[in-house]
């Protein structure tokens, strides 16, 4: 069959090479290497049109060449070791003959008139591998005259693949009529420039990759596995479910709401800085429980805008439930700056990130009954004045409401503020009275009960966690989308404030009575004047707005709720109540 195209000529040449090799293999491999005549005709060679079948047959011939060569080597070794009893010279000659498979491949390169540089690195690799496998096969089959099926199995595909790649069209196309590699000065220059550009691009990409993978918080790794875990945690169980970022997820309220959201199929990812305001073990235990339910808690601070942006890049959160805060009324006199850091700065960082997103999430965040401060009008309504805070804590929460309003007004963020009223329950906060009193009663140590002006007893609208969780979930479900996008407001957005209380204030003395009953022990009561550290005399929620808009309806009375807490406390701490707080 005649071939007229240059490509056909090249293929013909390549095919002829194989014919030669086959003939040579019949004459003995050694002879083939030294004497192959490139101009020789090959009558029974493969079709010069480069038909696939012929190429395959050529390649299988190459395999035959290599295998025959190995068999020859084996024969050499066997005969030399048996005849001379292993003399130094003959063992040297058998060692050199072991290298024959390498020589076969080298000859093959030469036959194709290609320098190694003409071959792609992958082809060279495969050829080298084939050669090594031949060499290895030889050693494995020492003492036998043929390759075992195992060795053939490993060797042949590599030889075949290497040959196929070497004869592939792009490679053959780069040969001139003489079969030499077609190169020119300009093509060499272009290749050089291309290589330099590739190198620069690789270095730049590597640098970008390293920067992106760098920990955004010292000591914490945010790598690919971390990213996968976030994405997995954020997966809702079906379409239509919200995907929520819960800040403070290892905290008391954050833990319970995250569980509830996950349970109903929402996508939930948490973030918590695990500060040591109260024992961190309890926060870790909450986070571990969440993880067992498929909710990841990122160990990070909301002040870390880089981390937040990275999380928002991974997941398009529909809502942010912002519960992370420096809690506690009285602690603010000891550590005022932690309140500024978490409740003010952290909140603004979070809002800044949220407002710049497209689409913006809706935000629901924890405010506090403490914003009513020294108000005397009861019950507290959302419409009442809140400009007389009694503690820095209360002031930061009131500031949050006002800051939130500006982000709603300027950027179109949909915002809901929830004023929690002394929330209690299992997995609660060790710094709060119900928790520390329980421990003291169990340990039979005195509790300090604060008394207000004129010996009045303080009272609180203690609210059970399950009721608050319902209020939070309903707030998420009724939140309208933000109207801004990428930092631009397109219309007025929802702004809401709700009281989430129990509506039944209880005096602290009566609250201790209930604890005594559940613990079956008497408290050692020590009545003291209320310290000037920010407490207010009473709280009492009017929840009519929440009832109307959220369907909020607290159902757990203090007796039932404290019973649940005491049961959990006993099972969690057992005899070691000292470990609690
Ligand atoms: O609802 C709220 O706004 C606030 O409720 C609690 O603050 P608080 O009501 O002071 O809760 P506890 O610390 O548990 O105190 C409960 C009652 O026990 C009293 N108490 C506390 C501690 C103590 O040693 N003795 C004592 O009589 C307090 O004065 C208060 O009347 C939370 O700690 C705040 O984070 C939350 O914002």
Image (spheres, rainbow, N blue to C red):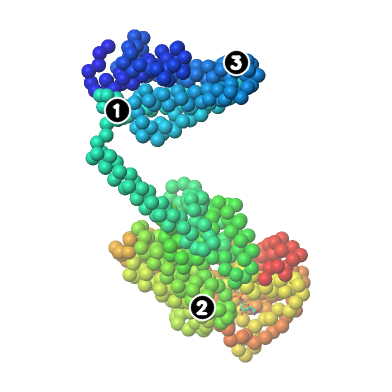
Mark 2 or mark 3: name the one nearer the start of the chain: 3
On the image, the x and y values in percent for residue 2 come to 25, 13
Q: Residue at x 51, y 75 (%)?
A: 339
Alpha-carbon span between mark 2 and mark 1: 77 Å
Q: Specify whether 448 is left or right of 252.
A: right
Q: Is residue 376 above or below residue 419?
A: below
Q: Which residue is mark 3?
A: 79
Q: Is residue 271 above or below residue 135?
A: below
Q: Tell me the quarter of the image containing the C terminus.
A: bottom right
Q: Residue at x 25, y 16 (%)?
A: 3
Mark 2 or mark 1: name the one nearer the start of the chain: 1
SS of the residue under disc 1: loop
On the image, the x and y values in percent for residue 377 come to 50, 82
Q: Which residue is mark 1?
A: 180
On the image, the x and y values in percent for residue 105 come to 44, 25
Alpha-carbon span between mark 1 and mark 3: 41 Å
Q: Residue at x 33, y 18 (%)?
A: 38
């Amino acid at each position: 069959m005649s071939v007229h195209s240059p490509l056909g000529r090249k293929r013909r040449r390549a095919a002829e090479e194989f014919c030669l090799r086959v003939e040579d293999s019949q004459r003995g491999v050694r002879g083939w290497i030294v004497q192959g005549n490139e101009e020789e005709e090959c009558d029974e060679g493969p079709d010069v049109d480069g038909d696939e079948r012929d190429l395959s047959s050529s390649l299988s011939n190459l395999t035959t060449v290599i295998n025959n060569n190995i068999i020859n080597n084996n024969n050499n070794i066997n005969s030399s070791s048996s005849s001379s009893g292993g003399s130094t010279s003959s063992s040297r000659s058998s060692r050199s003959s072991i290298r024959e498979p390498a020589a076969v491949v080298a000859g093959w390169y030469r036959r194709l008139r290609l320098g190694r540089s003409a071959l792609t690195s992958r082809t060279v690799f495969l050829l080298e591998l084939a050669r090594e496998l031949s060499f290895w096969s030889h050693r494995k089959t020492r003492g036998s005259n043929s390759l075992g099926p195992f060795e053939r199995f490993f060797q042949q595909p590599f030889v075949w693949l290497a040959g196929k790649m070497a004869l592939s069209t792009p490679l053959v196309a780069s040969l001139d009529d003489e079969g030499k590699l077609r190169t020119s000065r300009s093509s060499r220059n272009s290749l050089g420039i291309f290589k330099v550009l590739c190198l620069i691009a690789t270095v730049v990409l590597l640098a970008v990759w390293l920067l992106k993978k760098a920990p955004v918080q010292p000591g914490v790794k945010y790598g690919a596995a971390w990213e996968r875990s976030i994405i997995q945690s954020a997966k809702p169980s079906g379409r239509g479910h919200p995907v929520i970022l819960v800040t403070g997820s290892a905290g008391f309220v954050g833990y319970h709401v995250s569980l509830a959201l996950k349970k109903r199929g929402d996508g939930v990812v948490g973030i918590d800085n695990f500060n040591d305001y109260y024992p961190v073990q309890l926060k870790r235990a909450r986070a571990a429980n969440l993880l067992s339910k498929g909710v990841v808690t990122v160990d990070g601070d909301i002040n870390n805008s880089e981390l937040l942006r990275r999380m928002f890049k991974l997941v398009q959160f529909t809502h942010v439930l912002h519960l992370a805060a420096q809690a506690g009324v009285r602690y603010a006199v000891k550590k005022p700056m932690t309140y500024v850091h978490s409740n003010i700065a952290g909140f603004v960082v979070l809002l800044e990130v949220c407002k710049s997103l497209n689409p913006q999430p809706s935000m629901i965040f924890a405010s506090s009954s403490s914003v009513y401060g020294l108000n005397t009008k009861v019950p507290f309504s959302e419409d009442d004045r809140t400009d007389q805070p009694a503690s820095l804590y209360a002031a930061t929460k009131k500031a949050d409401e006002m800051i939130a309003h500006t982000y709603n007004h300027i950027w179109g963020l949909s915002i809901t503020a929830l004023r929690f009223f002394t929330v209690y329950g299992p997995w609660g906060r060790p710094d709060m009275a119900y928790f520390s009193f329980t421990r003291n009663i169990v340990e039979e140590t005195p509790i300090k009960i604060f008394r207000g002006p004129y010996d009045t007893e303080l009272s609180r609208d203690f609210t059970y966690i399950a009721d608050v969780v319902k209020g939070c979930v309903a707030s998420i479900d009724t939140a309208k989308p933000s109207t801004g996008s990428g930092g631009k407001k397109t219309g007025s957005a929802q702004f809401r404030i709700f009281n989430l209380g129990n509506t039944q204030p209880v005096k602290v003395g009566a609250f201790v009575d209930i604890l005594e009953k559940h613990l079956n022990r008497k408290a050692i009561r020590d009545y003291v004047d209320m310290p000037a550290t920010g407490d207010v005399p009473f709280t009492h929620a009017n929840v009519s707005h929440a009832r109307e808009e959220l369907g909020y309806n607290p159902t757990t009375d203090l007796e039932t709720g404290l019973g649940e807490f005491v049961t959990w406390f006993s099972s969690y701490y057992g005899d070691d109540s000292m470990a609690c707080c």
